Amino acid sequence: MRSRSKLNVSREAAQAVVAATFGGGCDLVGFGELTEGYFNAAYLLELDDGRRCVLKVAPPDDVPVLRYEREIMAAEAEALALAAARTAMPVPGVYAFDRTRRHLPSPYLVMAALPGEPLHRVRAELAPETQTAIDRALGTYLAQLNAIAGPGFGYLAAPAPAGAPWSAVFLGMLRDVLADGETAAVPLPVAPAELMARAALWAADLDQVREPRLVHWDLWDGNVFVERGTGRVTGIIDFERALWGDPLLEVQFRAFAPGDAFSEGYGARPLDAPGAYRRRVLYNLYLYLIMIIECTYRHYETDDQERWARERLGEELARLA
């Protein structure tokens, strides 16, 4: 997806990154942009020693981003390290995280390229039993990630002070994205002050969440790699939006009814917890507001995402009312 937030990187600049990461004797023999992402630029690097890597580059400093998106590349490096150390998730190894701007004008990550294909491309071609096995495995992996407890609520890129309740942190996140919308003059069907007042009525439900847990928050099929022949999950990517929060934030619970195979792998049903339905409505509102407002910031080629998210936002506002 073409986006204003993506930094163009030349082959010469990529070679400088390779030399800085692997030493001057390592050369770039293949180089090409990976275009499916929506925020960071990404490039496939093929090295003369046979390694394949992904170079992920943050937006230029002069490109406006949403408040929660500041410093999220550092958050991705941190979340990948946690997932690698404390779960069985197949995540890419990190070769370098550089925020010095010596080689590129923005922070960047160099990671191992994962084998397999994105699940959203091949799911429809897989046998039903293979899809079931994948969903069960994803449930297992996500349960392992969500079991990691953190020091305090909030995005890894900008954690709240230790001890701040989840209601205060989440409502602050909601307030921030509404402020992003006001800054960019994005029209919304409900005034921000009215929406915040309605959301605050459910603060007690948010405070049912007592312990911060690690949440991926973007684990849709496009961020899952699988081996087409076997259905084996070969990789999970894009941890940049990871946060310490309520596991119910995970996108698998967005539609209020995760599949049986996922639930079996996950081993619990968070939607059955007290206050879970109301919390999930608030989380959906937050997600759809981001999806709408970011379109103005990114200058996407089409309005498909915004139109889809506005329809979903209307459904959640009706639930909130």
Image (tube, rainbow, N blue to C red):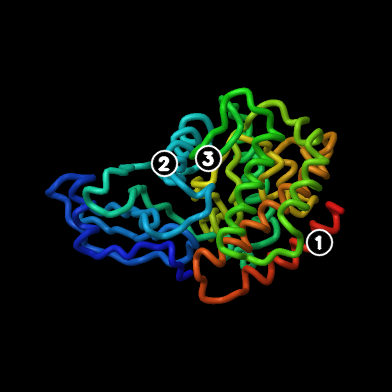
The reply to whether callout 2 and callout 1 are in contact (CB within 8 Å) is no
Image: 53 above or below 121: above
The residue at which mark 3 appears reads as: 89
The reply to whether callout 2 and callout 3 are in contact (CB within 8 Å) is no
Tag in front: 3 or 1: 1
Mark 1 crowdedness (10 Å alpha carbons): few <14, some 14-19, many ≥20: some
Q: Is residue 75 visible?
A: yes
Tag in front: 2 or 3: 2
Q: Is residue 95 visible?
A: no
Q: Give whichever of 88, 105 is nearer the camera.
A: 105
Residue 216 falls in which quadrant of the image? top right
Q: Residue at x 72, y 35 (%)?
A: 167
Tell me where residue 218 appears, x and y as whole percent. 59, 50
- Which residue appears farthest toward the bottom when viewing the image? 302
Q: Residue at x 42, y 52 (%)?
A: 114
Mark 2 crowdedness (10 Å alpha carbons): few <14, some 14-19, many ≥20: some
Mark 3 crowdedness (10 Å alpha carbons): few <14, some 14-19, many ≥20: many
Amino acid type shown at disc 3:
Met
In the visual, does 9 lie left or right of 279? left
Q: Secondary structure at mark 3?
A: loop
Q: CA distance from mark 3 to mark 1?
A: 34 Å
Query: On residue 113, which mark appears?
Result: none
The residue at which mark 2 appears reads as: 74
Q: Give whichever of 14, 90 is nearer the camera.
A: 14
Q: CA distance from mark 2 to mark 1?
A: 34 Å
Circle nearer the N terminus (2, 1): 2
Tell me where residue 208 appears, x and y as whole percent. 78, 30
Circle nearer the N terminus (2, 3): 2
Image: 175 above or below 214: below
Tell me where residue 248 appears, x and y as whole percent. 71, 41
Q: Secondary structure at mark 1?
A: helix
Amino acid type shown at disc 1:
Glu
